[in-house]
Image (cartoon, rainbow, N blue to C red):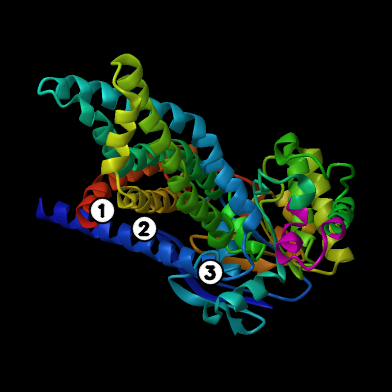
Amino acid sequence: MIESVNLHKAFGDKKVLQGFDLEIHKGESMVIIGGSGTGKSVFLKHILRLLEPDKGKMYIDGTDISSLNEAGLYKMRRRFGMLFQGAALFDSLNVWRNVGFQHLQERKLKEPEVRELAEEKLRLVGMVNVGDLMPSELSGGMKKRVGLARAIAYNAEVILYDEPTTGLDPIMADAINDLIVEMSEKLSVTSVTITHDMQSAYKIADRIAMLYQGKIIETGTPEEIRNTDNPFVRQFVSGSAHGPIQLEGIER
Amino acid sequence: MIAALGRLIIGFTLELGKVLIMLSDTLRKMATPPFEFSSSIKQMQEVGVRSLPVVLVTGLFSGMVLALQSYTGFKRFGAETLVGTVVGLSITREMGPVLTGLIVAGRAGAAMAAELGTMRVTEQIDALETLATNPIKHLIVPRFVAGLIMLPALTVVADIIGIFGGYLITVGMFGASPTLYWRQTWDFLTLDDIYNGLVKACFFGASIALLSCYKGFYSEGGAEGVGKATTGAVVLSFMTILISDYFLSAWLF
């Protein structure tokens, strides 16, 4: 469903993606793991063409998204929902207006209808009676839930999660993991998650792909990843500072 | 040295190109429905209504000091009666639009850059894109419209209060005849002076909004980046106002 072919992206002299190939199938939960600053978020942004590759192609259902015009691009983006790392809620809008944002923009539904729909999505992520609060009144975990409600508010077929558990306490992180699993089961969505939290990855993934030095170096089921022979992947999943992975700016 | 100069020119040209692309996008999105009425009104309130107190105070005192200085000067060769004319012309042609522009740039322009910059670094602009909403249309058009409409409106207020300030000093302090002051003001002030001042104001308003939004929209690098964008927006707006003021004056008057 989502296929990236030989993606390259550099910011100035810093090469981030260097021949990134990955295929994500419909209905699966793909988790991309990799160290901080390896370009996981950059890849995620390429899926929605928030960033354009320097080289290579991104296909959604066989369509090269670089060929889409603005209307086509927005039509494509409506099929996606994205949960940002810091939730990226709009500060100036209250919670239900954030969740119903896309419907409010379209102006097809009346405000009370949008509000009802937003409250329903909020219930789905376990939030009640928060519709009138402002984002600044929410905790980190609550923001992520609201962000998730916003991502699914337009009946997304694909949900992209940018480090969903980062910055949360372990219990809240696990609750978010449960939610992600629930979303894929209840709404039968395709999901793409990037994370460096292995516990989370094992819990939510159908398949895991590891990104290292701008390329996917291994793909497999959580079981296969756990038992891999690849020394890079082994080091990462075991969370050891010692091994073949080169840490940027650190000499050993 | 030559390489540095070249880099400077290339950098400048690149930025100018990006600003012009943003301008053309903004104009295009401005003309396509659905129109963002409610956010435009909100921005007009932000740019216009909230700047009003400062504009009133600045306008009043500029008129007053102008009268004070020209009265002292003109008295030396017995031309005190011309103070009304000088105040009227300088305020409407020059000080009204420029001072209002500088105030709006410092207040509303800085706020625009800071707000858009924060939205950029907290990924809210990316979020808009993922929610299939064009950020130019949603964020920049309302601010651009607000600048374009509110700056001339504020300038009219500054013109009136400035001339009144001049009257206060000339008549109230120096005891000149009120009738003479008004006659000297209106006899020499043409509608063209006011119109041209307002054309300047429109240009300043549009530039402030565009440049401040541009700086905020493309800011990067967290809190520091937002700070830089805000400073940059104010400096750039000030320079644009003062430089373009010369060329607009040469062209219009």
Tell me the mark number nearer the camera, choosing from 1 and 3. Answer: 1
| Residue position for label 1 | B248
Tell me the mark number nearer the camera, choosing from 2 and 1. Answer: 1
Does residue B225 appear anywhere in the picture?
Answer: no
Element at label 1: helix
| Residue position for label 3 | B31
User: Do circles 2 and 3 both sit on a common chain?
Assistant: no
| Residue position for label 2 | A12
Instruction: Report, in whole angstroms, how far the alpha carbon at label 1 lies from the one at label 3.
Output: 26 Å
Residue A63: quadrant of the picture: bottom right
Quadrant occupied by the N terminus of chain A: bottom right
Please state the extent of the stretch shown in magenta in the rendering: A98-113
Among the two numbered marks 1 and 3 on one chain, the one whose residue lies closer to the N terminus:
3
**Amino acid under disc 3:** Ala
Identify the residue shown where x is 55% and y is 64%. A50
Quick check: A243 left or right of A99?
left
Q: Which residue occupies the foreground of this view, B45 or A251?
A: B45
Label 3 crowd (10 A; few <14 / some 14-19 / many >=20): few
- Chain letter of disc 3 in the image: B
Q: Which residue occupies the foreground of this view, A75 or A83?
A: A75
Name the spot of residue A205 as percent of width and height, x first. Answer: 76, 61
Q: How many numbered badges does the structure rendering display?
A: 3
> Mark number for residue A239?
none
Quick check: A114 left or right of B135?
right
Give the overall secondary structure of the magenta segment. helix
Does residue A243 appear anywhere in the picture?
Answer: yes
**Amino acid under disc 1:** Leu
Quick check: A186 left or right of B30?
right
Element at label 2: loop
